[in-house]
Amino acid sequence: MSLKYGMLGLLSKWEATGYDIKKEFDDFMSIFWHTHLSQIYPELSKLEKEKLIESKMIPQNGKPDKKLYSITDAGRKELYQWLEAPSETPNVKDSFLMQTFFMDNLSLEDVLFQLKHYQKQREARLEKLKQTLYEQWQMIKEKNEFSTRLLMSSAVLKRGLDQEEEYILWCKRTIEFVESLEYLWNLEESNDCATINEVEEAFYRYFEVEDLDELKN
């Protein structure tokens, strides 16, 4: 997915300013996409040159005029073509997992600190998403209206909640896993290693299996 289609998707149902679009990305679409204001306005200009969107100036009392964008028929057609195309499985980039992969270079205390600190960050994200869900539901109840956009955006919000809960659980279980094998750091200092028999029980417990052959089923 590109920023282009995110913008066309937002403008497919309502007119918006560049600021409105940025707020939508920050408040809700951050579950699956992140962007900066410095990216949004150049992309809007590009879409307008391609005649996929159009704009008009709206006068404001005591404020600078604001530029309001809307989708064109050509833009709507391109959005539909993208929506109907098969989606590719995303290539994951997770900087914290990259750090975790190499945390054997840190002391045991630092490893546990990093894991616990990151868990708190994900817990904060989860609380923010729960607040978003609460506010969205209150708005829906107040208007007493429900639409296909609200239906599908709710599905995305549910995935975001599940994702944060899964990440928090992974942090908790990884902290327990590291703590159960903390003596490995002492072995590391003497350039020694544990045997498989010594770590097997903790390993299977972490992966919630009795034997890794279960993973083949």
Image (tube, grey):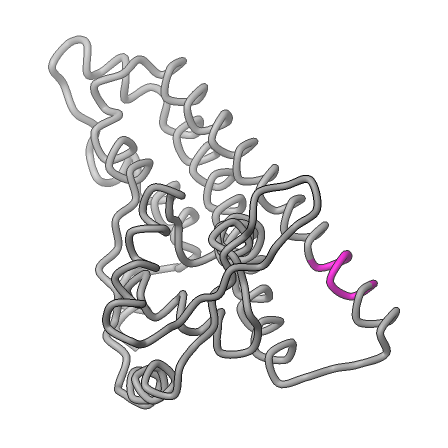
Residue 30 seen: no
Name the side, left or right, on which 48 lies relative to 168. left
Where on the picture, by quarter, is residue 36?
A: top left
> At 29% across and 51% down in the image, what residue appears?
42
The image position of residue 172, as x and y in percent, is 52, 38
Q: State the residue lying farthest toward the top.
A: 190
- The reply to whether the magenta stretch includes residue 155 is no
Q: Which portion, as a residue range, is magenta?
A: 133-138
Residue drawn at (36%, 50%) of the image: 41
Between residues 40 and 186, which one lies in front from this camera angle? 40
Identified at 47% across, 39% down, the residue is 171
User: Looking at the image, which is closer to me, 169 or 191?
Assistant: 169
Where is residue 75, by image quadrant? Answer: bottom left
In this rendering, does residue 49 appear at all?
yes
Q: Main secondary structure of the magenta part?
A: helix
Asked if 204 appears above or below 138 in the picture, the reply is above
Q: Is residue 17 above or below residue 149?
A: above
User: What residue lies at 65% left-to-right and 50% top-to-bottom?
Assistant: 60
Question: Quick one: 24 or 43, which is closer to the camera?
Answer: 43
Q: Nearer the viewer, residue 86 or 20?
A: 20
**Quadrant of the frame with the N terminus:** bottom left
Q: Quadrant of the C terminus?
A: bottom left
Q: Quadrant of residue 140?
A: bottom right
